Amino acid sequence: MSQDVKEKMESKAKPEDAKTGAAAQRVVDPDYLILEAPRKKEFITGSEAAKESVRRANVDIAIAYPITPQSETMQQVGYLYAEGYIKDYYRGEEEIGVMSAVAGASRAGVRVLTATAGPGLMRGLEQIVSWPGGRLPSMLLVMCRVVNAPLAIQPDNIEISYLLNSGGIVLHGENQQDFYDYPLIGFMVGEKPEVTLPVAVAVDGFFVTHARGWVSMPAEDIKLPPRDCYHEAVPMMDNENPPIRISRDSPIQKSNFISYQMHAAWQQEIWAAQERAKKWLNRWLGGLIEVVNPGAKTMIVASGAAVSQGREAVRQATEKGLDVGLIKIKSIRPFPTEELTEALEHAEKIVIPEFNYVGWLAKEVKAAIDRTDRIIAGPRVFGGMTMPTELILETISASE
Amino acid sequence: MSLKTIRPATGFKEYLPKEYQDLIDDGPFLRQRKVSELGSFKEAIEEHPMCAGCAMTLFIRLVFVALPSLEHTVICGTAGCGRLAITQGAVPFVYGNYGDTNAVATGLKRGLDIRFKDQPKDVVVMAGDGGLADIGFHAVMHSWFRKEKFTTIMLDNEVYGNTGGQDSGMTQKGMVMKMAPTGKKFEKMDMLGLAKTAGVAYTARISTTNPTRIANTIRKAVLIAREVGPTFIQAYTSCNIEYAIPTPKVIDDARDVEKDRYGFAEYFSDEAQSYWDESEKERKRLRKAAKKIK
Amino acid sequence: MGNKKKTQYRVVTGPEGILPPAATLMGISLPEEGEGLVEGEIVSEAEALEKAAIALLTRKNPTLFPGPLVLWGWNDHTDEKAKYFFDVANELPGIRIIPMPDYRPIYPKIDPEAVINPCHPNLTVLHNKIEACVFIGVHCHYASITLKIIRAGTNCYTIALCAEAGHEDAMASVPNFDIEKLIRFKDTIIKVKKNGIKPLYEGLGIVPTGWSQIASLKGKTPIKPEEELVEAGVSGAFSNELESGLDDNAE
């Protein structure tokens, strides 16, 4: 074969403009990607939905550690790395290492993602709760699976309660569709200069991660704009932006030279930043809550997979002629205190079904609204039990 | 670009504190400073809150002189005495959680490599024996196994100094410390041996006796980490408070300990050795060429 | 946001007390482009600039605090911005310029005439008896902290000219503060003076503060900060009564 024939064949096989992976994608406005781009429906698992979200999220680095049920998602993210959608990917040593490396990567100014579940979240918790104070935008996917002991790998979202006081943003997805949408929204919200916070997107493991559902998504040739790290609340640790003397995470515990006020004001600022996130969450989530059948005398308030059961309960209750509505809480942090107060103003009875023993959502709602005697803090299932809609309906009628 | 971060915008220089004006005019950024020049230029670190006579502080000061590219370096530390001084240096300093240095540095280095393809960024971990050999042990080891390209410097004072004198894994056997009331029960950890086993490209054991050697060792470690793989320096930086070393005797102690059990020792992997030999040759060639031009 | 209840809370000059709340959490929202924030209320950008100009012209020992993002020439934009920064300074008689060159906790102690630091900004404000100040080019996280600490313990009127979304904890703030807005601020100061606001330090230029500035700013006359504090509408050290809930020894 002559040299130029060979070259021609090669060029035919691989045309010069053939781009793959991220290179074949174009950056679009987040409004377009999240709200406007035409979508197509696919029947996929939650893990696959997360993968499709990450594919379009312009992620720079993903750091993985296997733990059920999250492993599959991070494997899927690994395939994205192999396909050229992510610039770096590795399996870390364990969660302290992974969550620390996430903090390092975020300080470097890149967009970083990891995922974890129950015990892994517990192991990485010291690191995770330090991200907001470090003002470290990042994405943590949490596939809830209960906290040991006894060891369990069943859907139960008790681990979310450990994130509530971290200062980070916590979104709780109901289904596969949310698991596609929320990470994209989370990246954009967390990187807003006035927010500059990490975002956790939690879903109930197995129900969402392993089961299939309909997910509508835009084409895969578009992606979010890259992280704009010089427009955030703190300097990057890259020695390219001032000040050169950066003790960004200043050790301020020495009361003899630093005022306690620094630490106090610092904490206030983290929670203020969370409050500022509401504006952007409202824009892209379409509100921190969704209300079904507003004005109903009995309102179910739920988050995560309990919302789906709540929807079905509302349908069945309506068939029976009962006046039941539903509030889906999408954002646990920031908590929709004002929205709930308003949407529950008229309610005579508030039922809060949960997939955990401690009832963290009921406590949150109780702290947020007035006339708390209206609240029935249940029903609850835990340790991997499913929640039959009958249980919700029984709870509603039992209190009549 | 990064040198611009130490250049004031037009008109602002006169308003900066003297310390910064000196750093701009006579700082360590524009060219590699030598140990012999100490006292004749504005160092990256001067004021600090460390105890009088602290050997660790001397070592840290020398690190700031030795770093081959201050304006492209980021330092990671953790709780301990050292960070009180390191935060005062004119180099970005990451103060993470307890013992997370080498995991943070992994993410940081990889992130910087993604963003700065044509500009090497040096990540240097500088933390204590407790931070690296005890609480941060797993992260240190795994960063070495993964061959992460950054330098780890252990400020080994053989004690938890900042919390008031508890024994660490690097404390010598038999020492009576705050959490070893009847004497420490096991040997000082062999971190250098572990480093070698883990495939670290260059390791060095050093005491605080010879400033030029300290500077050269650090420079070597950072440059090898940039090109070859992880490097590790274990430096004896005594705690004169917890070990009750009289302030004027700190360097004497460093000499004694060096003679006794902390003698200078370095190890190169084959790859590191050939890289270093080559780059030495190149430096010699450049020096000769420069002389000719003169 | 539509569902946000109108808040009664106002971000006024302190001393507010040991720990004032974050204004955001008291219901204060950030302004949009074209708007400004004055004492917690959304106003037009022009009004916010005017209020800021009046404060700087009439309150004692006015000071500009340029942060790292403007005082270091780290990109081409900063050099250009610096020129307009000094244009503003030159329109403010008796103005001091004290930089915030970095954010580290400074050992062994800060020189409050030479720098301001986010770890204890109140020291600089109190030492120099500053009653009106501007933060510009400070990263938002440190600006927010600084503003809260100043409002806690001083009677300083804080102005945040922010390149991003603005600051609820400042008494006056304008978002997306670029060169265009610096020019508009300068024009506002000129207009305010023309409209009859008599500058407190008529005839003075930029006043050096601290020995290093006096040494390097040739041709400028050092003047000690004015002694008395402008009345802040309070008699004691704090506007809020400390007895209510803060007395550890109360029986």
Image (cartoon, rainbow, N blue to C red):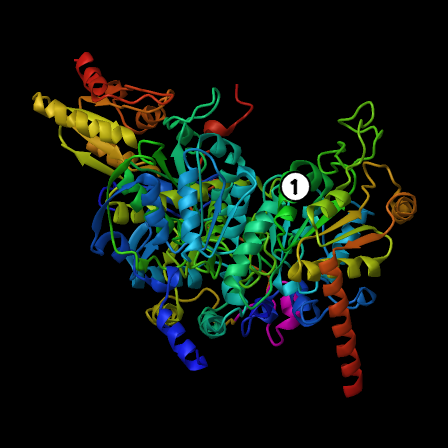
Q: Residue at x 25, y 28 (%)?
A: A301
The answer to whether residue C81 is magenta is no
Q: Residue at x 30, y 64 (%)?
A: C46
Q: Nearer the viewer, residue B111 or B97?
A: B111
Asked which quadrant contains residue B189, the reply is top right
Q: Residue at x 79, y 68 (%)?
A: B40
Q: Amino acid at mark 1?
A: Ala
Q: Nearer the viewer, residue A94 or B152?
A: A94
Task: Please state the chain letter of the residue tagged with numbered disc 1 in the rendered image.
Answer: B
Which secondary structure dominates the residues rendered in magenta?
loop
Residue B198 left/right relative to A392: right
Category of crowding for the residue at label 1, using alpha-carbon neighbours closer than 10 angstroms: few (below 14), some (14–19), many (at least 20): many
Q: Nearer the viewer, residue C1 or A385?
A: A385
Residue A100, image x, y percentages: 55, 43
The residue furthest front is A1
- Please name the residue that numbered disc 1 is placed on: B79
Judge whether B196 appears above or below B288 on screen: above
Residue C204, image x, y percentages: 51, 71
Residue C40 makes an appearance in the image? no
Asked which quadrant contains residue A295, the reply is top left
Q: Which residues are magenta?
A: C206-222
Residue A50, image x, y percentages: 35, 44
The answer to whether residue C219 is magenta is yes
Residue A298 left/right relative to B112: left
Judge whether A318 appears above or below C194 on screen: above
Q: Residue at x 38, y 53 (%)?
A: A192
